[in-house]
Image (tube, rainbow, N blue to C red):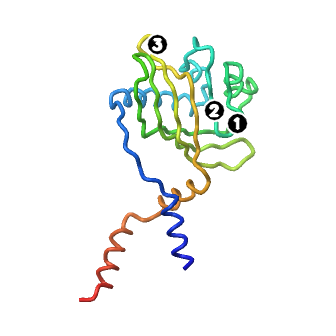
Amino acid sequence: MMRLAIILLFSLLTPGVASADYDDSLSADIQAFLDIYAEAYNRQDYDTLLSMWDQDYPHPIYMAEEIDPPMHGWQRIRAYFNPKPGFTVLDGIRNEYSEVRANYLTDDLAIATYRLRFDIKVKRQKALSSWDRVMAVFRRENGQWKLMAYTEAPMSPLTMVRKMLQEQVPDDFSDYIKVQKEAATPK
């Protein structure tokens, strides 16, 4: 009975995957931007990172999962990336961006969702890894995309644990189930 309850709970909490249209070419452009952004982030080159933001936009937003409330304005965002000039907070970080899906809002504005996978080592703490869903707004300036707003949207703990458990299932498990069902079927 407990096993059935767990299966029912997981099936109720597993949302259907909705399919949406997105612009393949724009998504590839944003992915190329994010590849460069990741290189700068992973080097902890925050000057380059911030140069990839639209410095002319007066109201940038950065919503990091670990900071509450969201950061509005250049002063808070610059302080986030460089809290103590000359002092590093991290021993290292590796960000990887994937699953980019972008659409135009206007000719020079785009919105994108993507996945951020990260490994991070904060000084005097153990390293950890995780992932987030991200939604960001970009503006094209002189033919180059720039960030205007960025939001990390981690899943609820239950959803994240479910995904982690699903990712641990061996590739051959479906074949195993099929063989077991065939063996159990009366002939």
Please identify the quarter of the rendering in which residue 124 is found: top right
Are dots 1 and 2 in contact, CB under 8 Å? Answer: yes
In terms of depth relative to the viewer, which is nearer, 104 or 130? 104
**Which label sits on residue 63?**
2
> What residue sits right under mark 1 in the picture?
67
Q: Label 2 sits on what residue type?
A: Met
Taking the view exactly as shown, the residue that stands out farthest to the left is 187
Q: Is mark 2 on a helix, strand or loop?
A: strand
Q: Nearer the viewer, residue 90 or 101?
A: 101
Indicate which label's residue lies in the foreground, 3 or 2.
2
Residue 119 higher or lower than 34, as above or below: below
Q: How far across and down, in percent of the image, does residue 75 sit?
A: 71, 19
Contact (Cβ within 8 Å) of mark 3 with mark 2: no
Q: Quadrant location of residue 48?
A: top right
Identify the residue position indicated by label 3 in the image: 141
Q: Which of marks 3 and 2 is nearer the N terminus?
A: 2
Q: Tell me the quadrant of the picture where the N terminus can be found.
A: bottom right
Q: What element carries label 1?
A: loop
Is residue 183 depicted above or below 119 in this figure?
below
Amino acid on which disc 3 is placed: Glu
Residue at the image point whose x is 63% and y is 32% from the top: 63
- The reply, left or right, for residue 186 in relation to residue 65 is left
- Bin the neighbour count of mark 1 within 10 Å (Cα to Cα): few under 14, some 14-19, many 20 and up: few
Q: Which amino acid type is shown beneath numbered disc 1?
A: Ile
* Neighbour tally class for label 2: few under 14, some 14-19, many 20 plus, Cα within 10 Å: many
